[in-house]
């Protein structure tokens, strides 16, 4: 149920973001056309009377100027990357366990109720550390070495679950600026095609093509920077949980050795 809820929440987030973006782009295009008509009708208006454009409005304007082709693909990379990042952050936060409290509880349960009581405590505790403890305690009757092997093997499984889909974030980090650079190259080619067709080196033709070309690169780099921040946080969180898992595994083996004595 939790995974289903997360999937539905992420799907709703992506849908709402896409719908809002498309609506904003359409309204912005209409507003630009109205503004252009008003400027054509009254070209003698004073520029100083215009209100300053905010950062959000400027970003929307530049996004539209960059064209729907590469800008749309870069936006999809941002939405998918953010969706995966949010899902991983939620999962990792839910996987965080108070290792010291769990270790003390397992040690106390072993002393008072034996292995079964300790297994029941781990079964009722969430997180990869509790799952590793349960696997080790489940093999405790077969000997300490068998329990240690089970802890190591299941620790690798838990590490794989923690790192699930993280590679997709790194893919979008690399893909967004590359798409931006590709848009820049294509925009430059279009600019030179216009110059060739006009037969003259007009500054307006060159400036317009270069501006559109560079906008794709800027937005690609912005997307990569945003996703890189989330990626680094996720990797740091995974490293922290893995370190707790390794320390807890060593502590569990020591506890089992002491319990056997």
Image: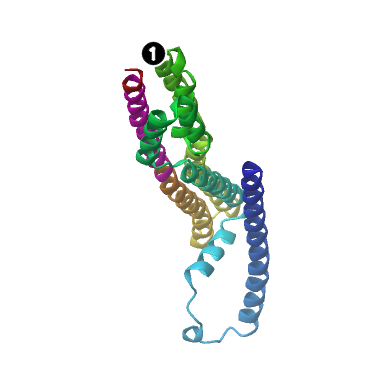
- State whether the magenta stretch is mostly helix, strand or loop: helix
Q: Is residue 235 magenta?
A: yes
With 233 as the anchor, is 211 left or right in this view?
right
Which quadrant would the N terminus be assigned to in this image? top right
The residue that appears at 50% across and 81% down in the rendered structure is 51
Given residues 17 and 256, the one toward you in this image is 256
The residue that appears at 62% across and 54% down in the rendered structure is 13
Residue 40 figure quarter: bottom right
Q: Does residue 159 show up?
A: no
Where residue 177 appears, as percent x and y from the top left, is: 48, 44
Which quadrant would the C terminus be assigned to in this image? top left
The residue that appears at 68% across and 59% down in the rendered structure is 19
Where residue 244 appears, as percent x and y from the top left, is: 36, 35
Q: Which residues are magenta?
A: 233-257
Given residues 194 and 212, the one toward you in this image is 212
Residue at the spot of label 1: 145
Where residue 142 appears, as percent x and y from the top left, is: 45, 12
Q: Does residue 63 show up?
A: yes
Q: Residues within 10 Å of mark 1 (few under 14, many from 20)?
A: some
Label 1, secondary structure: give it: helix
Q: Is residue 247 magenta?
A: yes
Given residues 69 and 101, the one toward you in this image is 101
């Amino acid at each position: 149920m939790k995974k289903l809820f997360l999937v539905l929440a992420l799907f709703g987030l992506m849908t709402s973001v896409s719908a809002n973006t498309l609506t904003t782009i359409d309204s912005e295009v209409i507003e630009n056309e109205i503004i252009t008509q008003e400027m054509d009708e009254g070209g003698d208006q004073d520029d100083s009377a215009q209100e300053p454009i905010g950062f959000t409005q400027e970003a929307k304007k530049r996004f539209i100027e960059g064209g729907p082709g590469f800008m749309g693909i870069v936006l999809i990379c941002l939405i998918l990357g953010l969706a995966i990042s949010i899902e991983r952050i939620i999962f990792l936060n839910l996987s965080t366990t108070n290792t010291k409290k769990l270790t003390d509880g397992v040690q106390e349960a072993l002393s008072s109720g034996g292995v079964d009581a300790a297994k029941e405590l781990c079964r009722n505790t969430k997180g990869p550390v509790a799952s590793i403890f349960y696997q080790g305690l489940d093999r405790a009757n077969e000997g300490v070495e068998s329990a240690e092997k089970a802890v190591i093997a299941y620790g690798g499984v838990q590490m794989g679950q923690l790192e699930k889909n993280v590679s997709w974030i790194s893919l979008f980090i690399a893909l967004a600026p590359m798409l931006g650079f590709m848009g820049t190259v294509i925009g430059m080619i279009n600019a030179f095609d216009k110059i060739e067709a006009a037969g003259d080196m007009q500054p307006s033709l060159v400036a317009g093509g270069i501006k559109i070309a560079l906008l794709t690169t800027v937005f690609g780099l912005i997307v990569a920077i945003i996703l890189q921040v989330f990626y680094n946080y996720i990797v740091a969180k995974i490293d922290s949980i893995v370190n707790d898992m390794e320390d807890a595994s060593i502590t569990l083996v020591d506890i089992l050795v002491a319990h056997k004595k």
